[in-house]
Amino acid sequence: MPIPESQLETWSHQGSITQSSNTYNTIKNVLEASTTPYADKNFKVFLQGSYGNDTNIYAESDVDIVIRLDDCFQSDLSTLTEEEKAAYKSAFSDATYTHVDFKRDVLSVLTEQYGAAAVKAGDKAIAIDASGSRRKADVIVAIQFRRYFKFRSSNDSEYVEGICFWNGKGERIANYPKQHSANLTAKHQNTSRWLKPLARVFKNMRSRMVDDVLIKAGVAPSYYIEGLLYNVPNEKLTSNYQECVVNTLNWYRQGASKPDLVCANEQYYLLRDGQHTCWNQANCDAFVEAAVKLWNEW
């Protein structure tokens, strides 16, 4: 039998934001203190992830924070002509304070504040353990990233601005959290505010599917679930949660052009194998089929 509307309604509710808000503001104040080694640099601190996008559920605890240095940047020049690439290279010089310096300094600030036992530099982010009312937090230390579409001079150029950072293997990962958030909000408004509650429904379904061993943990990250729902045609998200869920699952299985689906930031395709910023299609398929099984066997 289908999952009752009452259960889906419960799953649609946003998780507590008080602790996450307090955690974010406390860490933000630490990162922005006037005594930090980078206090004289241009940088921004902001939320990303479920809390930043208002799609968090009760089961989610991590607060994802970005601190982005704007005094240096990396670029994607792949769409530029050779003439434009030459103009770019003549316009900029190498930075003297780099991502390596910035991450070292941010790590030192967080370690001094919270202690070496609570702060760990992971593969992509600096993790801060939960303590008391403070939730666990992941701090991504990034620099500005620019995907250029035109470059004639520093004053005559076109680019999309994002962030980039490096993992433990030294591989650069570029992403666009601001565009992801803005596009999700626009889609939410264009679907009579069904999108974000529906994202919470599917995240809670994922948690149940992991508990029931229908999928493995890590198969369906929240970022990709939001990306999948971003592609669902607006007219499929209507009237009640049961119809929204059924329409979404049927659309993916029967009507979606899977190679053409995009991430919510609209800068990457959603389904591509072996890429840091894309969902392996086998994992997406497994998530959808497990959701169908959960629905049918409720």
Image (cartoon, helix red, strand yellow):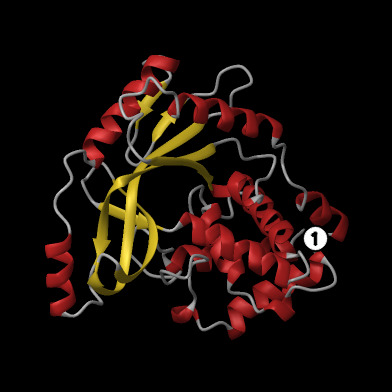
Question: Horizontal placement of 133 versus 136: left or right?
Answer: right
Return the residue nearer the eye: 84 or 54.
84
Specify the quadrant of the image occupied by residue 296: bottom right
> Dot 1, crowdedness within 10 Å: few (<14), some or many (≥20)?
some
Specify the quadrant of the image occupied by residue 58: top right
**Residue at the (40%, 23%) spot, across then down:** 110
Residue 273 x/y as whole percent: 35, 67
Return the residue nearer the eye: 136 or 150.
150
Q: Please say whether residue 117 is visible from this viewpoint.
A: no
Q: Compared with residue 289, is residue 251 higher up or lower down, i.e. above or below?
A: below
Q: Compared with residue 88, is residue 118 higher up or lower down, i.e. above or below?
A: above
**Residue at the (65%, 69%) spot, across then down:** 187
Quickly name the residue at label 1: 3
Figure quadrant of the N terminus: bottom right
Question: Horizontal placement of 115 versus 169: left or right?
Answer: right
Return the residue nearer the eye: 36 or 55.
36
Figure quadrant of the C terminus: bottom right
**Residue at the (39%, 57%) spot, across then down:** 162
| Number of marks present in the image shown | 1
Q: Which residue lies furthest to the right in this view?
A: 6
Residue 237 x/y as whole percent: 74, 73
Q: Residue furthest front?
A: 155
Question: Horizontal placement of 127 versus 289: left or right?
Answer: left
Question: Horizontal placement of 163 versus 296: left or right?
Answer: left
Q: Please say whether residue 105 is visible from this viewpoint.
A: yes
Residue 224 x/y as whole percent: 51, 60
SS class, disc 1: loop
Three-letter code, disc 1: Ile
Q: Compared with residue 208, is residue 224 higher up or lower down, i.e. above or below?
A: below
Residue 278 x/y as whole percent: 40, 63
Q: Compared with residue 102, is residue 194 higher up or lower down, i.e. above or below?
A: below
